[in-house]
Image (tube, rainbow, N blue to C red):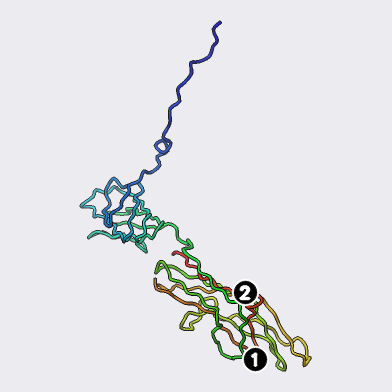
Amino acid sequence: MAYPFAAAEVLTAVDLNAMIGAPTQNAITTVTYTAVLLDAGKTVTLSNASAVTLTIPAQASISWADNTQLNFLNIGAGTVTITPAVGVTINGTPLTLTTSQRGSLVRTASNTWTFTPTGGGKVLQVVRATDGTERSTTSGTFVDVTGMTVTITPQKSTSAIMVFATGKAKAQWTTGIFQAGEIRLTDSANTAMSGAETLTIGTNRISLSATPARFFAPFTIIGYATPATTSPVTYKLRFLSESTDTTFTLMNNVNIGQMFAIEVAA
């Protein structure tokens, strides 16, 4: 008896990348490279332990089509610097790609390109410092909090640095009317960081009792800087007492004092 079944079909592998038009790669491992017409629409990977110079040639050398897009990805340890040939203008900054960073160039006119780096806002590194010792002051002017410093070496001169300090403060007074102190984040030259110029911790006297009283408060203070360097930079916490009869204390021995420096790519 014959059955109405179709003959078995032979399945063949299908290249989905080819079907959907996924970009192919052009792997470059030299320290110098000049873009070519066939790079359009591809991802050019650049990989070298040393610095790499990537040149975008002029229209007279390459017949770039309108709206050409060139995509680049740095997978090496060396920084890639994108350089225009004579007569070429590239708008956009910075014209560099660090490790694992990518970017695109779009031709907007003859011999004019716009560069768009991707990955902005990426956290590049986090440095943490801690202090477990109680720190006190009766100074009416800002002094350094020993142990509360953090040093970071930016990977890029265009990065922003976010600095956080956390801890628990205590203000104690005897006969005055205030129990308060102030903290701030500064650079190594004692210049206050943006957003962290002054944080007051404390209160007016709660009662008229002659018995010494205390005020406790956890705190977090956040500063922002753009040091524009790839050399080490140091940030620190400073504090003062608002009254001559008040001792202002950071209780790092009870709640570990912490500082974080976070580098964020532009």
Q: Quadrant of the N terminus?
A: top right
Q: Is residue 72 above or below residue 3?
A: below
Looking at the picture, tell me which residue is in the foreground, 55 or 128: 128
For the residues carrying marks 1 and 2, which lies nearer the camera in this image? 2
> Which tag, 1 or 2, sits closer to the chain's start?
1
Q: Quadrant of the C terminus?
A: bottom left
Q: Is residue 54 above or below residue 208?
A: above
Q: Is residue 58 visible?
A: yes
Q: Is residue 41 visible?
A: no
Q: Residues within 10 Å of mark 2 (few under 14, many from 20)?
A: some
Residue located 58% across and 73% down the image = 258
User: Could you say which disc has been placed on residue 243 in the image?
Assistant: 1
Q: How many marks?
A: 2
Relative side of 59 to 107, left or right: left
Looking at the picture, tell me which residue is in the foreground, 113 or 203: 203
Q: Amino acid at mark 1?
A: Ser
Q: Amino acid at mark 2?
A: Ile
Q: Secondary structure at mark 1?
A: loop
Is there CB contact under 8 Å for labels 1 and 2? no
Name the residue carrying label 2.
256
- Please state the horizontal and vertical placement of residue 97, each as a whole percent of the image: 37, 59
- Please state the horizontal and vertical placement of residue 176, each as a whole percent of the image: 70, 93
Q: Residues within 10 Å of mark 1 (few under 14, many from 20)?
A: some
- Please state the horizontal and vertical placement of residue 141, each as a whole percent of the image: 56, 90
How far apart marks 1 and 2 lie (CA) works out to 26 Å
Relative side of 94 to 53, left or right: right
Using the rendered view, name the quadrant where residue 198 is placed. Answer: bottom right
Relative side of 128 to 84, left or right: right
